[in-house]
Image (spheres, coloured by chain):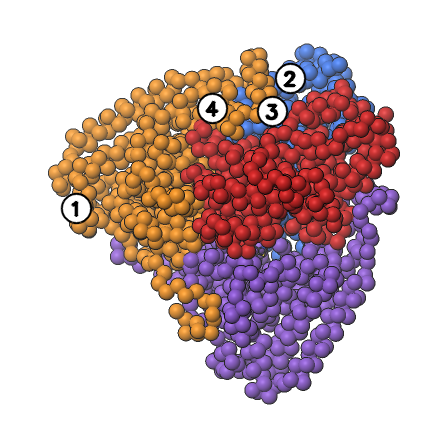
Chain colours: A purple, B orange, C red, D blue
Amino acid sequence: MSSAAHTLPTVSTLQSAPTVSTELLQVMAPDGSVVDAAFIATIPEADLIRLYEAMLAQRVYDDRMIKMQRQGRLGFYLACTGEEACSYGPAYALEARDWFYPAYREPGIALWRGMPFQAWVDNMVGNCDDPAKGRQMPVHWTARAQNIVSISSPVGTQIPQCTGSAYAAKLMGHDAVSICFFGEGTSSEGDFHVGLNFAGVWKSPAIFFCRNNGYAISTPFEKTTAAAHIVLRAHGYGIRGVLVDGNDVLAVIKAVRDAADWARAGNGPTLIEAKTYRIAAHSTSDDPSSYRSREEEALWAELCPLKRLRAYLETKGLWDETKEQACVDTSSARIIAALTIAESKPHPALDTVFDDVFAERPAHLDAQLNAMTAHVASGESDYRAG
Amino acid sequence: MSSAAHTLPTVSTLQSAPTVSTELLQVMAPDGSVVDAAFIATIPEADLIRLYEAMLAQRVYDDRMIKMQRQGRLGFYLACTGEEACSYGPAYALEARDWFYPAYREPGIALWRGMPFQAWVDNMVGNCDDPAKGRQMPVHWTARAQNIVSISSPVGTQIPQCTGSAYAAKLMGHDAVSICFFGEGTSSEGDFHVGLNFAGVWKSPAIFFCRNNGYAISTPFEKTTAAAHIVLRAHGYGIRGVLVDGNDVLAVIKAVRDAADWARAGNGPTLIEAKTYRIAAHSTSDDPSSYRSREEEALWAELCPLKRLRAYLETKGLWDETKEQACVDTSSARIIAALTIAESKPHPALDTVFDDVFAERPAHLDAQLNAMTAHVASGESDYRAG
Amino acid sequence: MATMNIIQAVNNALHLAMAADDNVVVLGEDVGKFGGVFRATVGLQAAFGEDRVIDTPLAESGIIGAAIGMALYGVTAVAEIQFSDFIFPAYDQIVNELAKFRYRSGGEYPCPVVIRTPVGGGIRGGHYHSQSPESLFVHHAGLVVVAPSNPYDAKGLLLSALESPDPVMVLEPKRVYRGPDHGKNWGSHPKGQVPEGHYTVPIGKAAIARELTGDGTAVTILTYGAMVHTCEKAAALAQQEGIDVELVDLRSLMPYDLEAIVASAKKTGRVVVANEAPRMCGYAAEITSLVMEHCFDWLEAPVTRVTGYDTPFPYTLEFAYLPDAGRVLTALRTVATYG
Amino acid sequence: MATMNIIQAVNNALHLAMAADDNVVVLGEDVGKFGGVFRATVGLQAAFGEDRVIDTPLAESGIIGAAIGMALYGVTAVAEIQFSDFIFPAYDQIVNELAKFRYRSGGEYPCPVVIRTPVGGGIRGGHYHSQSPESLFVHHAGLVVVAPSNPYDAKGLLLSALESPDPVMVLEPKRVYRGPDHGKNWGSHPKGQVPEGHYTVPIGKAAIARELTGDGTAVTILTYGAMVHTCEKAAALAQQEGIDVELVDLRSLMPYDLEAIVASAKKTGRVVVANEAPRMCGYAAEITSLVMEHCFDWLEAPVTRVTGYDTPFPYTLEFAYLPDAGRVLTALRTVATYG
Ligand SMILES: Cc1ncc(C[n+]2csc(CCOP(=O)(O)OP(=O)(O)O)c2C)c(N)n1
Ligand SMILES: Cc1ncc(C[n+]2csc(CCOP(=O)(O)OP(=O)(O)O)c2C)c(N)n1
Ligand SMILES: [Mg+2]
Ligand SMILES: [Mg+2]
């Protein structure tokens, strides 16, 4: 590797590090025209339609939820608008036995993998049927049956956890990969480094999926790092790296499939960087107008992942405006109905505050539960049951 | 950079990232023969002799201190044997105004830059003249007058601190660089990532000097990372990276000088990886015989940085066995005398326990000081003044 | 004098400090162009430039680590941690480095970083936007920790922090950022009247937020931060039941004002200590122990704690979880009628 | 029965657990080939292979983060943190993730990681090899925290931890790893007699380390970990002065054995609480408050704390800093003669 390496006995003998590619992987061009026909041919047309319908529905859910939040019907919401391909693509690409560590911007993983829709909406409201028992903010759901790990607010913590799950699966002889999602902002946290480096050494069958949507709240990519791409970091961990067009759902599927194949074959992890754009605000607490330009937003609106797939489907005669409208209408009705049901459900019971802290409730929490119950019953509590 | 980059407006426009080189920088070959005559010519011969004397003296100090520790005269010691070039080289290469963040294995930075020898030895004993006031273990000295930051035990924390100091110097218009030292094991900590990434974005005039000595206590390099070299990580931060033969003190000087020039010119940080070997045990608490081979140790003993420089000097007629023996004898006498003096000094006063927690001692610490003083005076304390 | 809420008071203090000293730097996530997610740093970047008001990469350990390096070198760094729930990646830098720098260097390296971070619940933030971590910092020697409850103190303590030779953590009570009570803004509150120029509030001194009226059984409440307002409400209700409250706003958690604590406890012999954080090893445990140690013979009743429960912070049931005026009132009754 | 020191007892427990269950994994810095810097994991890698006894890269956050992921997936990960002083880079993973996983997932994701880490001073480690961080973990709901004082409990509690459905931190008292007192080994101590096979010590139960003799003024000492031995020494000295000590070894810090605490405090009415950590918001503050709350009418004297001082841990003056038998004795005298 280096001209004087013979003088240095412990210089690693590793001959060929896995490839780190900065070629942008695309299957469809932004106008929907085909770049990689061979790959498209591997995806049944019915699946392409299902994927488009799901992403379009997601767009509708996100739009409606933001409106509902403005009306005060939700405490908080956070949309994936513009980034739908980055959750529906990986969800499609992997198997039921695989494990997912989503951040907060991957609803598609829940919905595609079969988390019940009503449960997902119940989480937005935090009612008694919320799988997270109303303990976390909206958008922090959990779906054990789908092998999707409970969402956390602190960013980056999921990355070494994913390394650990992947290792555990390998140790137990399971053919399961673990995939973790995070934003490019999050890649600045120490846990990114630690998680990827451990995975490299352990050859954990893991996929690290970095959604580079250009911003961490208001912070633009160039203030996140001086590197041209996050994927360049794969060099530093001796792992495989792939750059993919995150608005091309088929390219995302290909990138994740390849990474899964690589992992299942025992070669270890892949870092995938998906270039995309956060079309919506960071969350309902944010207003991007002060930190980015309308021009930039317009440019990216054109590159939207839905537009691209729709263009392809229309060329193939698989989609049209009538279908579009029908899907929008159904999705809209569906989310409004589910939200109405969710709102009609009561709060979680008081004792849920003290459950699941430990497997069994210890004595000091019995005492605190009694105190809380008595206080709420006294009528002197600020809390009003809902 | 990528074929489809035109479709992605926020893909960074950064055209040319700084070079990351995995060519091993050498000025002298292991047998002392010249690789880069032009560079050697820039270093006065008197300085070469001074450097050799200092490194040889260090070897003697380390050997003696380890023996003293075995005799129970020191609580702990940690040698830099085999890695002398990695502290004397950078200390020589930089300016008085520059800032140093050593780890625990860079005594040369203190001694070359003029920390009083007795103060350095007083720190090993933790007596009343220890600049750290007997508060930390041996080898955790501090030297404000030399712009050397107090040594910490937790590894890696110094890295983002160095980024901050470097930034501060730039902000204040000072032409000072900051340099931070750490082992290859430490490069696995999150703070490594965070510190280098911040420095890249800020173009901090910083030098990150990774001593890759093959082991983190017992953990070999291949269990630290799957990457062939730590320096590859520079790619991921968009910063300059240099691989240097850490047993070639002149190459180390050259690498650090180049990095300082680069930083002073406003180009930002450099990650230097110096390949070397920890000839001694990790510390006096360690025994490497169980985790590495005698063959490996022997191989590296041959590559020792002292041998190399001595061979060069002898070829030039600048050094011989008589000088060698004289230097060993003087150094040995010097360290033994200083240690004897250090041992004769009393412990720091009791109230030093309560000083410097804050700039002024608050009331609750006055009360605790009084309690401690009374307790020690009562004769019922386990503490015996020394 | 101007009417300010806490955010405005903080912003005003930062403007003053940065204008007065070129070596003051503000750094954190989204503090620059955007002005911070709570808007506390609005306008600073426009006024003082990108070099002094820095949008950092998303890494709390880097924010604090770099701030430490700046402070060692001679720059006064004011670091914002967006929510105190996200301070833990920087915990090692704060407790092992920042807290110990002066000490471990024998006094050679003071490290006067200022850390501002919003704390506490009541904003529908669930368990990752609601925590109150003060006890986790005061336990480590070397950190000054202040917890203002109102705009006047927020500004005065922040300016003191900026002038302090020690590292200071300013825990900002986010629930009352914009008003002292749900809906009520700072306009009608005396502590919402804030001088526009420079002044300081001394670190280490408590304030009496409500004095005894002499009418009823005297009880002391010791508290700080947003809980001061909860306790004010409880005290007003208690007065109607013949309980006369001296409300001590501790303001400074480390160092703490033992004199004020002991004076009030000895005066009333009946003490309630309130904090929003979980009970187990919370700040109230320390204050309870101090009162016990210094005032045992004066106590007419056990010192009684009102605290968060020992669970993570919930979302939907937040207002059942949060210590409210009703719970303080119950404690006041217990303490007032004990024996 | 065999004579074991704490290291051997821990090692023995790990051997048993790994032999019994293929899904137990040990990971940490230098735990494999080297067997750990304190030798607690010696022989495990030879017996169970590199896949199950893992020398990790040097990153505590990675050790705990990966252990969490393993536990979520179904592997029982036993993570060693080399010194508890170095646990703080993993603090976020422990308090925001590990502690909250079961809760935040509505019970869907239990996360039974076991963390072993040596704590405390007395080994000439200065301020980065001596800290006692227990209060920083019990403050966060969701973590079980145990602190054995002897080989028997160390093994029994570790085996309980391995069977627990909750995350458990085992704080190992490194000063007494090899013997209960400076120089004295475990051979002559009843708790150094350890069954070689499987047994457990229940989590949540205190033990009486020394019973009242009925001779002298009865005083309770509540303590745990290495301080148990310091307090035993003090109790023996106190007996000669007419002070009769009931010494309670709390063993389990979360959950804690309130029944045992209250029973002893009510019996004696005189209580000393001792811990090695700094005083401010330390574990002793909580226990002091609990005794006050539950036993106020029984108290003959203020509950008195013996703790580390509120400074970083020093090196040369370590034995002036560390709470020693003399300081416990002073507290016993104060409490015994109060009033
Ligand atoms: C440790 C931590 N620090 C800060 C925050 C506050 N925060 C929430 S999202 C966010 C930006 C994340 O950006 P990125 O990773 O790019 O993801 P994106 O939102 O763009 O999908 C920040 C700073 C947090 N959740 N966790
Ligand atoms: C945060 C932290 N974790 C663990 C340790 C214990 N420790 C001290 S030195 C060391 C190995 C460091 O290896 P490396 O960085 O390669 O430096 P070297 O000793 O080889 O010079 C370890 C694990 C520590 N000091 N700090
Ligand atoms: Mg982003
Ligand atoms: Mg090393």
Question: CA separation, marks 4 and 2?
Answer: 23 Å
Residue appearing at x 17%, y 40% in the figure:
B44
**Letter of the chain that mark 3 sits on in the rendering:** B
Q: Distance between the residues labelled 1 and 3?
A: 61 Å
Q: In this view, does C41 lie above or below B75?
A: below
Label disc, if present, on residue B364 of the rendered structure: 3
**Which mark is first along the chain, 2 or 4?**
4
Residue topped by disc 2: D329
User: Which residue is drawn at the image coordinates 61% and 51% (left, top)?
Assistant: C38
Which of the 4 image quarters holds residue B249? Answer: top left
Classify B237 as above or below B293: below
Task: Name the N-terminal-most of marks 1 and 3.
Answer: 1
Circle 4/circle 2 CB separation < 8 Å: no
Q: What residue type is labelled 4?
A: Thr
Disc 1 chain ID: B
Tag on residue D316? 4
| Residue B343 percent location from the top left of the image | 38, 19
Badge 4 element: loop
Query: Which of the two residues, D184 or C118, is positioned nearer the viewer here?
Result: C118
Return the x and y of residue C122 as percentages of the image width and height: 71, 48
> Are the residues at dot 2 and dot 1 in contact (C-beta closer than 8 Å)?
no
Residue B41: which disc? 1
Name the front one of labels 2 and 1: 1
Q: Say if disc 2 is inside 8 Å of ligand 2.
A: no
> Are discs 2 and 1 both within one chain?
no
Density class for disc 3 (Cα within 10 Å; few <14, some 14-19, many ≥20) is some
10 Å crowding of disc 1: few (<14), some (14-19), many (20+): few
Residue beneath the point at 65% across and 77% down: A53
Toward the viewer: C165 or A29? C165
